[in-house]
Amino acid sequence: MKLALIGFVCRRVGGSLRQSFWTHVLTAGTVSMTLFVFGGFMLLETNLQKLLKSWGAQIQITAYLNSGLTAAEVSDTVKRVQSLPEVERVRHTSQEQAWRDFQTALGSQSTLLEGLPREVLPASIEISLRPEHRDAPAIDHVAQRLKQETQISSVEYPQEWIERLGLLVLVVEWVKWLFGGVLFLATFFIVGSTVKLAILARREEVEIMQLVGASEELIQAPFVIEGMIQGLAGAAIATALLAVAYVLLQREIAPVAGLLSPVGDLEFLQVYNVGMLLAIGLFLGATGSLISLRRFIRTWHVSSARA
């Protein structure tokens, strides 16, 4: 009996897809546009997160040492800094090494340094943090601890742009959900309106099934499945469009990828992101169909009772 019901539902779904093909295509297209915009925000967020992590790997805190420290005091300071749980590695640069590095950086203009005392370039410690401690709060926490060291005169790190990039990622994430929520709501009503049109076109068939005692689940099943197909098709189309946009953008960036690295090395959506798009499409199609069906059936019951 169950197999017969499944076959009946499948035949109704197949017949509806053939008879109202362009209506289903229009609905799937609407879903795909919504998910394409939402997926675009996801793609932007993914690459901003990657950019933040890539630049985070290059972030260093520079602690300048007081002048006149003995070798033992410098060694003790380096060991204490290295022992911090957030610190990955420490590199000590003496005054002499800092002077030589500055001369090398100036190249042919190194003669400009003649007459300057070498004490103008203090010894320093360059500190690299562990990957899990490269966000703005963790970096600021380490910097504050370093400032408490009596052998350290000052601490420098790129705090401003770290905070700005982190804020940008947060803004994109919130805009993705807020803007996506508006689009989802609009798509939800469009799917519901499409289902209403389908119900009106097959009103007599639905009423006959109700009169002969068909359960509401059996009546609703074909419409819900059609909505799920529309949602999945829309999500698949959106993913394909995102892939095409990604390839085209990658080609445009490729000639200058070396100059923009790591910005030029774009990353596509992760598997779980694609799965989220498919799940959202499925949810939009199924839920929009189900709510419209229940409203129709409830209205039909009221009309029948009054008659």
Image: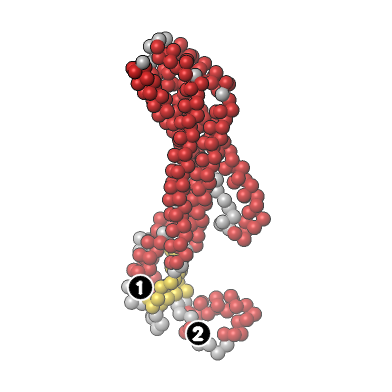
Dots 2, 1 in contact, CB < 8 A: no
Residue pointed to by mark 2: 118
Q: Position of residue 236 (x, y in %)?
A: 54, 35
Q: Is residue 261 above or below residue 105?
A: above
Q: Position of residue 121 (x, y in %)?
A: 48, 80
- Residue drawn at (51%, 21%) of the image: 201
Which of the two discs, 2 and 1, labels the residue nearer the N terminus? 2
Judged from the image, the secondary structure of the residue bearing numbered disc 2 is: helix
Does 284 sit left or right of 233 as displayed?
left
- Residue drawn at (59%, 40%) of the image: 241
Quadrant in which residue 291 is drawn:
top left
Q: Is residue 75 above or below residue 67?
A: above
* Amino acid type indicated by mark 2: Arg
Distance from Cα at disc 2 to Cα at disc 1: 24 Å
Quadrant of the snapshot with the N terminus: top left
* Amino acid type indicated by mark 1: Lys
Does 1 sit left or right of 305 as displayed?
right
Residue pointed to by mark 1: 147
Task: Say if residue 88 shows up in the picture.
Answer: no
Say which of marks 2 and 1 sits in front: 1
Quadrant of the snapshot with the C terminus: top left
Q: Choose between 305 and 39: the one closer to the eye.
A: 305
Judged from the image, the secondary structure of the residue bearing numbered disc 1 is: helix
Q: Is residue 140 above or below residue 70?
A: above
Q: Position of residue 191 (x, y in %)?
A: 48, 32
